[in-house]
Image (cartoon, rainbow, N blue to C red):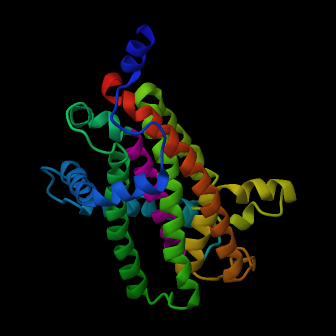
Amino acid sequence: MARAEATRADVRTSEPPRLRAFRRAGELFRHRELIGNLTGKELKVKYKSTALGVVWSMLNPLLYLVVFWLVFTVFLPSGIPDFAIYLLSGLLGYTLFSTGLQGATSSVVESAALVTKVAFPREILPLSAIGASLVNFFYQFVVLVAFMLVIGHSFLGPQLVLAPAALAVLLLFLTAIGMGTAATNVRYRDTRHLVELSLIAWFWVTPVVYSAQLVLGRLGPVADGFYLANPLTAVTLSFQRALYGYQHMTDGTPVLPDAGITWYAIRLGMVALASLVILYLTWRAFFRMSGDFAEEL
């Protein structure tokens, strides 16, 4: 009798006890309209009562562009030709990751009123936060393409296939990490601050404002392996190869690794496989912890 009462006391959710990934994915697909509505809500709340609206999402990378252009072109010349395009082609992907991860991390906590009153798959919350960042990414991408067309920078070619591939892998990796931080942040609110600090360090170990060639080959093959193991390095290099192209610095050194499209595609594939493993683990942890969200918020 006591055991039965204890068992009933432990049941806090109507969800099945274990994650069935394919079945759960189908359930999330059936809630796609809710994901779209919450994504729209995220954008409306973010730009509510602002005069410029979504223009603010374009000003963020433009501010980075102006600051880093002054630093690495005027004061500390990097030697990278068309530095503005090089910077923006890498910065857009990192901005999507940064804003998406911060939004996903805080998504459950910031939707406490909804979580405690309405029954729905909790994964929708980090997914909608990532979706809002994705919308901003497309606005920024349009600005970059328009800028390249105005200055006559050629980017059409077979390497362009790397751009959608890099975006897909980035979203997969972002979802995998965001699912874990969203669940952890409900129990440990320090997670949000840890994510913010980690993103600062992550920015500088990713070749966004400098050429990866400044690192590769200087510290040995082991260090090169660790550097290339950074998932954002593979994604950023692929965006740069797709949009910036293959150019040389003023000293004749290639700006990007001197390799074919296949080299970049292989590294994206490796990141995708690792992200799938991470996603399964974080998704399972999120699913297991989601039954306690209403009580902990």
Q: Seen in the image, is 109 located left or right of residue 160?
A: left
The residue depicted at 85 percent of the width and 54 percent of the height is 222
Question: Is 286 located above or below residue 1 in the figure?
Answer: below
The answer to whether residue 87 is seen in the rendering is: no
Q: Nearer the viewer, residue 17 or 183?
A: 17
Q: Quadrant of residue 51?
A: bottom left
The image quarter containing residue 253 is: bottom right
Which of the pair 82/234 is nearer the observer?
234
Residue placed furthest toward the top: 2
Spot the residue most to the right. 220
**In the picture provided, is 22 more to the left or to the right than 133?**
right
Residue 278 visible in rendering: yes
Residue 164, image x, y percentages: 49, 75
Residue 228 sits above or below residue 246 on the image: above
Instruction: Classify 121 as above or below 255.
Output: above
What residue sits 59% from the left and 82% below the top?
245
Residue 254 placed where, x, y %? Answer: 72, 77
Asked whether 285 or 11 is in front, the reply is 11
Q: Residue at x 42, y 8 (%)?
A: 2
Q: Which is nearer the eye, 102 or 277?
A: 277
Looking at the image, residue 40 sits to the left or right of residue 177; the answer is left
The residue segment tinted magenta is 82-105
Whether residue 222 is in magenta: the answer is no
Principal SS element in the magenta part?
helix
The quarter of the rendered structure image containing the C terminus is top left
Query: Residue 75: image x %, image y %?
Result: 57, 60
Q: Is residue 161 above or below residue 21?
A: below
